[in-house]
Amino acid sequence: MQFSPLIEQFMEALRCLPGVGPRSAQRMALHLLERDREGGRRLAQILQEALDQVGHCRRCRTLTEEPECRICRSSKRNEHMLCVVETPADMLALEQTGIYDGHYFVLLGHLSPIEGIGPEDLGLDDLLSRVQDGAIEEVILATNPTAEGETTAHYVHELLRPLGIRVTRLAHGVPLGGELEYVDGGTLSRALVGRGQFD
Amino acid sequence: MQFSPLIEQFMEALRCLPGVGPRSAQRMALHLLERDREGGRRLAQILQEALDQVGHCRRCRTLTEEPECRICRSSKRNEHMLCVVETPADMLALEQTGIYDGHYFVLLGHLSPIEGIGPEDLGLDDLLSRVQDGAIEEVILATNPTAEGETTAHYVHELLRPLGIRVTRLAHGVPLGGELEYVDGGTLSRALVGRGQFD
């Protein structure tokens, strides 16, 4: 036995959400139908609105329903710094540190020949012309510390090299609050090589 | 910093789903917007349809978009057995055992003075008149083995007692595949008291 066709389709449709398997989809569908139809209606409406209205910031490519995102519009940000990240979530994580006040450029992915993602998909032409415009003095490459992220960072570095501006990357090392015993060898090697004066 | 207003509202709306906190809501919203707008559109549409069309089976009260659910419509089920459960999910769990071929009655909850849920909310009038109709010979009370479930079962038992039909309940005991060491004392006591001939 299963539930009725429409309920089964509803459960199936919920599986498009990341981390939602058959059991959670069932629990979610029954919860909304039995106990929170009001919340379900709000979700259906906002989901539709978000899909219709959210696009990309024309300057930094982050997700936003406005032509330009809040950071790109702000007059309080340092115009000479540009931080290149893979996703809007990475941008948020860096913002939450509270110590960066420059601008961003969101690649919306990383180079991946296997997935067919090339330089043109990452908006690298836009990035290049933005840096060529002249105000930017430093580009921080903050792609993920994965094989694809590193490859992407190297590619962007090569692209920007002829412009002669400063290109930096995030430091690698042991994360705060962990125990050395559990830090992987690669990270530990980077932390040793990159060691600094004790102060 | 946060995301733009519409994206923040979208994340907030996703929190109506059970088990979805701020981090999962963010991951879900960004996933749909960045990588699966097609799935998102399908979800928005089906969610709306399900909320508009899914109601309750007029015989057993389970969730369905049809006037009567598949089990109530079936001519192959045993008309003399009625199993009372709290939710459509409990009904599905029993169906999946494959050994019950009778009908169901879904309370859609349990008695709870604190939450203001009384007999009238559980359709007990409908249950009573259905049993009074005459075909039913046994009612299995399969409410949850919780305080509220037990209270509800006792209440239904009292309600049906004057009719003089057989009223049964699911057996309590040690679950299969576990280790005795980890079975709680209450369950173990019930398993001892309810012990049967080794065969």
Image (tube, coloured by chain):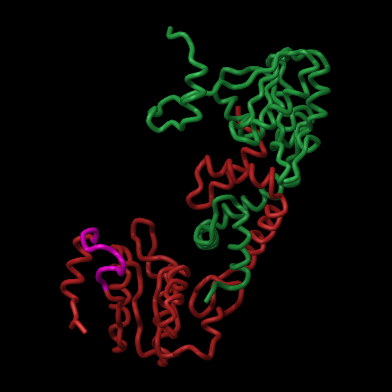
Chain colours: A green, B red
Residue at 20 percent across and 63 percent down: it is: B186
Q: Residue B175 in magenta?
A: yes
Residue at 77 percent across and 21 percent down: it is: A160
Which of the pair B40/B158 is nearer the observer? B40
x and y, in percent, of residue A96 in the image: 56, 25
x and y, in percent, of residue A176 in the image: 44, 24
Q: Quadrant of the N terminus of chain B?
A: top right
Residue at 41 percent across and 82 percent down: it is: B99
Q: Quadrant of the C terminus of chain B?
A: bottom left
Which of the pair A104/B47 is nearer the observer? A104
Judged left or right of residue A165, residue B51 is left
Judged left or right of residue A64, residue B159 is left
Note whether B41 is above or below A75 in the view shown. below
Note whether B45 is above or below A46 in the view shown. below
User: What secondary structure prevails in the magenta region?
Assistant: loop
x and y, in percent, of residue A1 in the image: 52, 77
Residue at 28 percent across and 83 percent down: it is: B161
The magenta stretch is: B172-183
